[in-house]
């Protein structure tokens, strides 16, 4: 599709909400009826399968990498129907959670039992990256969402970022996060490397009226595109295999508006009944 959009999520810090926010972003677009492919390349800290219950023994990133450039990428992309059909003995409660996901929410991610020590060695890295990117580009999805690794040097980190239409960087509320990102951006600017023209930074775990928001923006040298406050309810939603949370999903809608993607406004249920919706 000529009008597909590729959006990459990146952070060079751990535990700042990159997975949570990128999943909520992709999920919201799928709820809108868009065909969305969520691609997890963060092999050192994979979490898609565990946090969603969506995992397939054959259709996954590990199996694709093992094919060593000889594959049809669609053979490794799955959605909820593939997961349910491949596991008829799945726990009923988990199956009901998975059934609630949109049919148009597709994923290419590491399986639930994957450990980064299982990562195969790719001998021809440049060829692998080229084949992977071209394969992704020729799929028929409206949106492709990359959750990239935390290291730009990884073969499926920077090469994916540079192909994106939009880059969304996420930092936490610590000045260390802002300093690390600033140093990395300075390094990129000192080289021949480039970043997408549309580049937004989210400050996670921080209130918009926080007294140290200005200090973080000063360190980074740019204003936050969006601030997302810490959500104490998020853990409960994650244990329930729910993507995002009412507060996070509300922030994602604001983010979508800021980057020019229109979606139908939704009013998430709040309070005690929200967990049953």
Image (cartoon, helix red, strand yellow):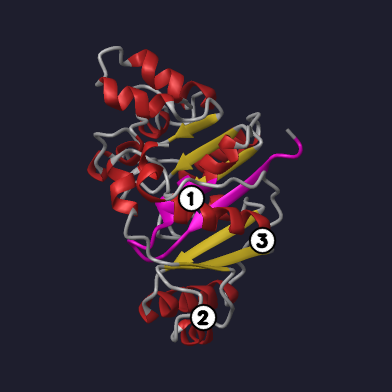
Q: Taking 38 as reference, is 1 left or right?
A: right
The residues bearing labels 3 and 2 have C-alpha atoms spaced at a distance of: 20 Å
Q: In the rendered structure, are the residues bearing label 1 and label 3 in contact, judged by CB atoms less than 8 Å apart?
A: no
Taking the spot 41% from the left edge, 65% from the top edge, the residue there is 12
> Residue reaching furthest front?
272
Find the magenta span and give its range: 2-25
Q: In the rendered structure, are the residues bearing label 3 and label 2 in contact, judged by CB atoms less than 8 Å apart?
A: no
Residue at which label 2 appears: 220
**Residue neighbourhood size for the residue with mark 3, other residues' Cα within 10 Å, grouped as few (<14), some (14–19), many (≥20):** few
Q: Position of residue 71 (x, y in %)?
A: 50, 24
Q: Position of residue 167 (x, y in %)?
A: 59, 58
Question: Closer to us: mark 1 or mark 3?
Answer: 3
Residue at which label 3 appears: 258
> Is residue 46 visible to the viewer in this orientation of the structure?
no
The earlier-in-sequence mark between 3 and 2 is: 2
Taking the spot 48% from the left edge, 47% from the top edge, the residue there is 24
Q: Taking 166 as reference, is 177 left or right?
A: left
**Residue neighbourhood size for the residue with mark 1, other residues' Cα within 10 Å, grouped as few (<14), some (14–19), many (≥20):** many
Residue at which label 1 appears: 22
The residues bearing labels 1 and 2 have C-alpha atoms spaced at a distance of: 22 Å
Q: Secondary structure at mark 1?
A: helix
Q: From what the image shows, is residue 261 above or below residue 110? A: below
Taking the spot 42% from the left edge, 24% from the top edge, the residue there is 99
Taking the spot 52% from the left edge, 87% from the top edge, the residue there is 218
Q: From what the image shows, is residue 53 above or below residue 217? A: above
Q: Nearer the viewer, residue 175 or 230?
A: 230
């Amino acid at each position: 599709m000529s009008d597909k959009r590729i959006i990459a999520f990146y952070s060079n810090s751990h535990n700042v909400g990159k997975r949570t926010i990128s999943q909520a972003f992709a999920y919201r677009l799928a709820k809108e009826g868009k065909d969305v492919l969520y691609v997890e390349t963060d092999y050192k800290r994979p979490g898609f399968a565990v946090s969603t219950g969506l995992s397939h023994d054959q259709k996954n990133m590990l199996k694709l990498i093992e094919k060593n450039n000889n594959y049809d990428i669609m053979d490794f992309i799955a959605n909820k129907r593939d997961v349910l059909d491949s596991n008829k003995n799945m726990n009923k409660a988990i199956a009901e959670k998975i059934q609630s996901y949109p049919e148009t929410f597709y994923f290419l991610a590491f399986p639930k039992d994957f450990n980064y020590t299982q990562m195969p060695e790719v001998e021809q890295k440049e060829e692998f990256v080229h084949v992977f990117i071209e394969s992704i580009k020729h799929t028929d999805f409206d949106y492709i969402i990359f959750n990239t690794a935390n290291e730009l040097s990884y073969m499926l980190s920077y090469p994916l970022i540079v192909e994106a239409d939009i880059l969304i960087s996420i930092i936490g509320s610590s000045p260390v996060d802002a300093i690390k990102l600033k140093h990395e951006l300075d390094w990129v600017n000192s080289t021949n490397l480039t970043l997408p023209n549309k580049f937004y930074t989210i400050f996670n775990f921080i209130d918009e009226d926080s007294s140290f928001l200005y200090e973080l923006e000063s360190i980074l040298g740019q204003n936050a595109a969006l601030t997302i406050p810490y959500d104490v309810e998020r853990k409960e939603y994650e244990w329930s295999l729910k993507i995002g949370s009412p507060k996070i999903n509300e922030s994602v809608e604001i983010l979508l508006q800021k980057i020019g993607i229109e979606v139908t406004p939704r009013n998430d249920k709040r309070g005690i009944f929200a967990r049953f919706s």
